[in-house]
Image (cartoon, grey):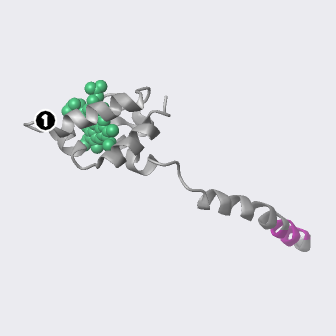
């Protein structure tokens, strides 16, 4: 009985470990890490917080963030937008545009 349990645990670890390590090693989609910052206020995956981001197109998000960067009396979101390079904005906008 005991031996069977050990055998079972051994077989299970052989079967499961490759799957687990693949999950851990798989690279996250580009832009997700940058966009995760937005979820603090805009809600997980861009909805459920202030202003819904999910469902917006990448070009809309890029346009809005770039306008915010140029505001002469920047408020919170405008200041936040200033922290990103053009490349980062494109990346996070492309990721956000995949969310519904
Ligand atoms: C600290 C909280 C906070 C974080 C973090 C934050 N936002 Fe915002 N965002 C706001 C608030 C509050 C508003 C609404 C007021 C305003 O426009 O200033 C807003 C507005 C917006 C709008 C305009 C929405 C509309 O429909 O008019 C966009 C686009 C936006 N945020 C994108 C982002 C993106 C992309 C990120 C991540 C890079 C982000 N925000 C991170 C608080 C935040």
Q: Nearest the camera: 66 or 99?
A: 66
Q: Is residue 35 visible?
A: yes
**Which residue is tagged 1?**
71
Q: Residue furthest front?
A: 86
Residue that appears at 13% across and 35% down: 71
Find residue 58 and report its image quarter.
top left
Where 88 falls versus 9 (above or below)?
above
Q: Residues within 10 Å of mark 1 (few under 14, many from 20)?
A: few
Circle 1 SS class: loop
Q: Nearer the viewer, residue 8 or 15?
A: 15
x then y, percent, for residue 2: 88, 72
Residue bounds of the magenta highlight: 4-10
Q: Main secondary structure of the magenta part?
A: helix
Q: Is mark 1 within 8 Å of ligand 1?
A: no
Q: Is residue 61 toward the left or the right of residue 100 in the image?
A: left
Residue at image location 56% in from the left, 56% down from the top: 27
The residue sitting at 63% across, 56% down in the picture is 23
Residue 14 falls within the magenta-colored stretch: no
Q: Is residue 53 visible?
A: no
Image coords of residue 21 (percent x, y): 66, 63
Image quarter of residue 56: top left
**Which residue sits furthest left?**
73
């Amino acid at each position: 009985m005991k031996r069977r349990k050990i055998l079972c645990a051994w077989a299970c670890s052989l079967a499961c470990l490759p799957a687990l390590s693949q999950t851990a090693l798989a690279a996250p989609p580009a832009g997700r890490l940058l966009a995760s910052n937005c979820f603090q206020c805009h809600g997980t995956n861009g909805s459920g917080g202030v202003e819904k981001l999910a469902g917006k197109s990448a070009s809309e998000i890029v346009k809005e963030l770039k306008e915010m960067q140029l505001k002469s009396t920047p408020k919170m979101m405008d200041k936040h937008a200033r922290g990103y390079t053009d490349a980062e904005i494109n990346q996070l906008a492309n990721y956000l545009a995949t969310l519904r």
